[in-house]
Amino acid sequence: MKISICKNYNPGELKDFNNDKVSHGWEAQEIAWKNEDIVDLTTKCGISCNEYSDGHRCSDSWIAAHNIMLDFDDGRMTQETLLEKQKHWDFNSYIFSSQNHQKPKNSKHPCDRLRVLIPLEEPITSNLDLEAVKNIILERFPLTDKGCIEKARWFAHGTILVRSFVGDKKFLNWKGLLKSNKSNTTAKKDEDDIYTFSLETELKDINKKIIKVKGISEKTIIYCPICGEALYRNNDGHNAFIDINSKGLYFIFCSSCETRGNGVNGKGIYNLNSADAYLLKTKELGTAVFIDRNNCQLHSVTVEKGKVMIDLIKSQYYAEQYCKSKSLPIPKSFPHVRLEHRFDSDEIVNFKEEFVNKYIAPDVLKSPIPEEFKAKMPKYIGRLIDHIFAGDLEIINRFINDLAYLTQTRKKLITSYLMSGTEGTGKGVFFKLVLRKMFGERYCAETDMDAFDSRFNDFLTDNFLVLVSEVSANFTAVERRGLSIVEKIKMAITDQSIQIEGKGQKRFNGNNNCSFLFATNRRHGIVLSNDDRRFNVAPRQEQKIINMDWWPGYPELVDIINSELQNFVWFLKSYVVNYKLIGVVINNSSKELLQAMSTTDCEDFFDALNKGDGDWFAENLVKKYGYDGDDRFENIKSILRGLKDDEFIETKRLCEIYNYVNNKNLSVKSFLKLARLHLKTEIVQIKKSSSERPRGIKISMKFSDSIF
């Protein structure tokens, strides 16, 4: 027989030690099928049933399979049962125990851990043949580890606690195995619409309990759904079974229907319909053909090495050829779905909900919380967060609450955070080393304000989290452009459905999946209104992170955070989220200071007018323009004095005050348009005399006694 042996394997060490040593160094060798030689092989060597072209144990280097190794590792197959089965096999085999034989697994009780080495009459060199043999072996030995026949599989040396050598028969003829199985599958390959059923079909099992096809996982005795309880039958017993064929598809065989010539080719066979067969196999094989609703074009989707591969298919003919090459059933029509990022789902293909998902979550995000895990903020990630948010516990606690919500639900946040500080406070480091690694580097982007100025906004659907660096509200140079960007930012933060336009694509209504963080080195990074409901503002951090006592150095920090990241994700997953705070911002002193800096002269003017804050007018009047000999100043001062006792003010007089205080030259008509946007009271006609009815507003102005 021929088998691969690893020269880097150390039989004096356990498998965990050897795992790191056996990716290379494999060589196929001829071994006599003799009891003493096989015992020596299986108790001293690390072996693989496969041969590799360059000694590298991987699928790309696979040449052939020379043996089959059955691996019974969970105790369900006992040594007594396996030894009894071996007596009836018509091929050579060697049963032996693994290193973990009779050690507990998933329970307190020890269990049998057994292997069977079966030599093949000739090597398997075709991927299709290997897959076919694998399916038959798994069908005949359902208790064996399903990965034992994989191309890159290897086995550590075992023991002789259990051993049984058979050498007087023949090597396994796998081609004959396929031929003998063919007769059982011929009828199952052909589908006739008259003789099909669906995954939702309800059946009666041996006890007449109703079960659905989609819930069946192994061969099950049933009553035939066609004739099981028909009056023409002579007895009322069960007469059929449902099973899964070598292609992984359900079929039903009914002996009564076979007697009457019913079923596919009159053989009593009923197959799964083509649509459900297609859905079932796409999920199993991780590949599919579909029509994208956005552009009505055929595409294929394949998941390879943690990446989603989407390719355009030119025509129906090529779509059918693709299905044949991937062993997919060909449906009557390919599903129409939306090709999009579903960040809240781990499913790649879901034809029921009609989507193909371009997002694959990192393992660190999908990993379940271990039972023994104790929730605690990791040391250095906690220090990094504390530094970025300048030690403000209110902001930090809210950020952790929002980040836990984002981690647990993977749904968009409609509020954001503004992190400000001198250059080098760790804002980008945290985003790069923690957040991007958590949610996927290809789905978290760092950008600047120009992203919002572009007509193309498909980054809102393609990204889960975006850090907007060096955000600035200095739009005075191009005012109209600036206001446009501000409005786009507001929509991007809060709107969950938005019109999406990508380069070379038509606009369509899509999901805005993106949550945002904003960072700036400027003290006045962004314009905020007094009623802002989007931003949590952190205190400004003036200390560089490299100047902190706990700073370990950047390379060391990278290693530390990598080691803490999984625990941080588990901490967030186990965090009890306060859902009442989701979508609500904190109005703290940092935000109030920013708002005070952000408000425009126009906003300040009308804010004071709406509040009846007469002192604001007097203070700004004196502060800005108060000097002797200014006739306009005295005129405005006189108007303001009159407001102490007046209940109304004419819009003409109000316009004069506005122009003087803000150094503007608006007409009354233009001022009226502006006033209607800001005033909380209506502009009405004021009755002064029978002939005079000017426009104005009702006021209630309060002044300090000594203001003038």
Image (cartoon, rainbow, N blue to C red):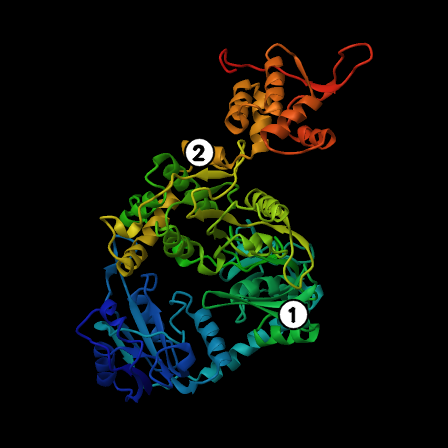
Using the image as rendered, state which of residue 285 and residue 417 is in the foreground.
Answer: 417
Instruction: Give x and y (percent) for residue 431.
Output: 40, 53
* Secondary structure beneath label 2: helix
User: Is residue 670 placed above or below 49 in the rendered structure?
Assistant: above
Q: Which mark is residue 659?
A: none
Mark 1 or mark 2, which has the lower sequence index? 1
Circle 1 is placed at which residue position? 330
Q: Quadrant of residue 356?
A: bottom right
Whole-angstrom CA distance, mark 1 to mark 2, is 64 Å
The residue furthest front is: 629
Q: Amino acid at mark 1?
A: Ile
Circle 2 Cα neighbour tier, 10 Å, few/some/many (<14 / 14–19 / ≥20): few
Q: Quadrant of residue 340?
A: bottom right
Using the image as rendered, state which of residue 612 and residue 138 is in the foreground.
Answer: 612
Instruction: Give x and y (percent) for residue 120.
Output: 39, 84
Using the image as rendered, state which of residue 512 and residue 112 is in the foreground.
Answer: 512
Q: Amino acid at mark 2?
A: Leu
**Image marks 1 and 2: residues in contact by CB distance under 8 Å:** no
| Front label number (1 vs 2) | 2
Instruction: Give x and y (percent) for residue 138.
Output: 44, 70
Circle 1 Cα neighbour tier, 10 Å, few/some/many (<14 / 14–19 / ≥20): some
Note whether residue 380 is visible.
Answer: yes
Circle 2 is placed at which residue position? 593
* Secondary structure beneath label 1: loop
Instruction: Give x and y (percent) for residue 33.
Output: 29, 87
Q: Quadrant of residue 187?
A: bottom right
Using the image as rendered, state which of residue 393 and residue 512 is in the foreground.
Answer: 393
